[in-house]
Image: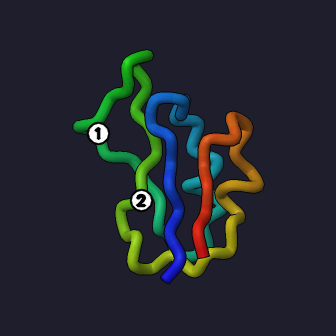
Amino acid sequence: MAMATINIERCKGCGICVSVCPKDVLGFDQDILNSKGYCPATALRPDDCTGCAACARMCPECVITVDR
């Protein structure tokens, strides 16, 4: 099973990863803020991750890793 992992402390919540995920795995949990005050992206549906790594390739902060 593939899994996208996001370093929430470094994520700035830009949403690029959310927009490129073909399976709508990623999204925002409005109850989570990192220490810099950003609402980071998170895997809301991790079981649907196919491991395509589109999110990791597009992340401008390079905070996403995908394990296949």
- Residue at the (53%, 77%) spot, across then down: 2
Q: Residue furthest front?
A: 67
* Quarter the C terminus occupies: bottom right
Dot 2 crowding, Cα within 10 Å, few <14, some 14–19, many 20+:
some
Q: Residue furthest left?
A: 31
Mark 2–mark 1 contact, CB under 8 Å? no
Please determine whether, in this image, residue 51 is positioned above or below residue 55. below
Instruction: Give 51 or 30, whichever is nearer the viewer.
Output: 51
Image coords of residue 50 (percent x, y): 57, 80
Q: In this image, 27 relative to 13: left or right?
A: left
Image coords of residue 55 (percent x, y): 65, 58
Nearest to N terminus: mark 2 or mark 1? 1
Dot 1 crowding, Cα within 10 Å, few <14, some 14–19, many 20+:
few
Looking at the image, is mark 2 or mark 1 nearer the viewer? 2
Tag 1: residue type? Gln
Q: Gap in Å between the C-alphas at discs 2 and 1?
A: 13 Å
Q: Residue furthest top?
A: 36
- Residue at the (37%, 70%) spot, across then down: 45
Image coords of residue 7 (percent x, y): 50, 40
- Residue at the (64%, 47%) spot, across then down: 16
Mark seen at residue 43:
2
Q: SS for tag 1?
A: loop
Mark seen at residue 30:
1
Instruction: Give 43 or 3, whichever is nearer the viewer.
Output: 3
Tally the numbered discs. 2
Tag 2: residue type? Ala
- Residue at the (38%, 18%) spot, across then down: 35
Q: In this image, 56 relative to 43: left or right?
A: right
